[in-house]
Image (tube, helix red, strand yellow):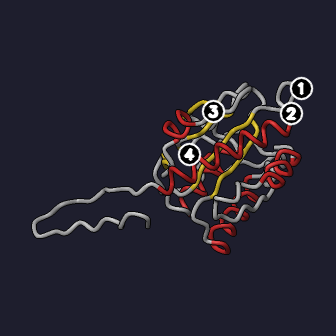
Amino acid sequence: MKPWTLVELSKLGLGNETVVQLRTLELPVDYREAKRRVTGIWEDHQPQLVVHVGMDTAAKAIILEQSGKNQGYRDADIRGFWPEGGVCLPGSPDVLESGVCMKAVCKRVAVEGVDVIFSRDAGRYVCDYTYYLSLHHGKGCAALIHVPPLWRGLPASLLGRALKVVIQEMLEEVGKPKHKAQFEENSTMVLPAKGN
C-alpha cells in the first residue's frame, strides 16, 4: 500500500474519544520480512488489536477480510521467495478467523463515496500470509483491510477517512463482551460488570 494513505490516517488519528495508540508501519511485499516484523509487533508491543491494510489492485471497494489461510502460497514475493511447501506455519490450522466480526462491522460502516464489503478469501499472497501470522500470534486479535488503488474518485484523504471509520467500528466490535462459556456440572460463569 502506498504510504500516503498511512500518512493520511496518521494525521486523522482515531478521534479523541478513542483511547488507543495508533502506530503505522509499512511492511514490504516480502514473506520473510513480513514474518519477522509481525512476530516483532506481537512480541515487543503486545497490542490488543493489529489492523493490517493492504492494497488489492483489482478491488473497487474496501474489503474486510474475516479469515487468514495457512496454505496455498505459490506466488513469489518481490524478492522471488515463497514459503516452503506454500505453507505459512507448518502444523497449524488451515484457517484462522479474526475475533472481529467483519460482517457486523461491514453492516455498520457508512462512508459516502466508498463501498465496504466482506470477504473470507484474502488471496494467498503476502497480505494473507501476514494476516495469518498475526491471527496466530494475536490469538485472533487482528484484522485485514484490503483497499483499492487511489484514483481521482478515491483520493488519499477519502480513503484515510474511510479507514478511520472502519477501524473505529472494529474497535467497537472488539470492545463488545463475548459471553461464551462451557457449562459443566458445578460450573460458574463470570461475566464482566457493565462499564468494564
Q: CA distance from mark 3 to mark 4?
A: 25 Å
Q: Secondary structure at mark 1?
A: loop
* Residue type marked 2: Pro
Q: Which residue is mark 4?
A: 68
Density class for disc 1 (Cα within 10 Å; few <14, some 14-19, many ≥20) is: few
Q: Residue furthest bottom?
A: 44
Q: Residue furthest left?
A: 185
Q: CA distance from mark 1 to mark 2?
A: 6 Å
- N-terminal of the two: label 3 or label 2? 3
* Residue type marked 4: Gly
In this view of the protein, can residue 74 be seen by the observer? Answer: yes
Q: Mark 3, mark 1: which one is toward the viewer?
A: 3
* Residue type marked 3: Ala
Q: Secondary structure at mark 2?
A: loop
Q: Identify the mark at residue 61; answer none if there is no mark.
A: none
Q: CA distance from mark 4 to mark 1?
A: 31 Å
Q: Secondary structure at mark 3?
A: loop
Q: CA distance from mark 3 to mark 2?
A: 17 Å
- N-terminal of the two: label 4 or label 2? 4
Q: Residue at x 48, y 47 (%)?
A: 97
The total number of labels drawn is 4
Q: Report whether 40 appears left or right of 12.
A: left
Q: Which residue is mark 1?
A: 152
Q: Report whether 3 appears left or right of 49.
A: right
Q: Residue at x 58, y 40 (%)?
A: 65
Q: Secondary structure at mark 4?
A: strand
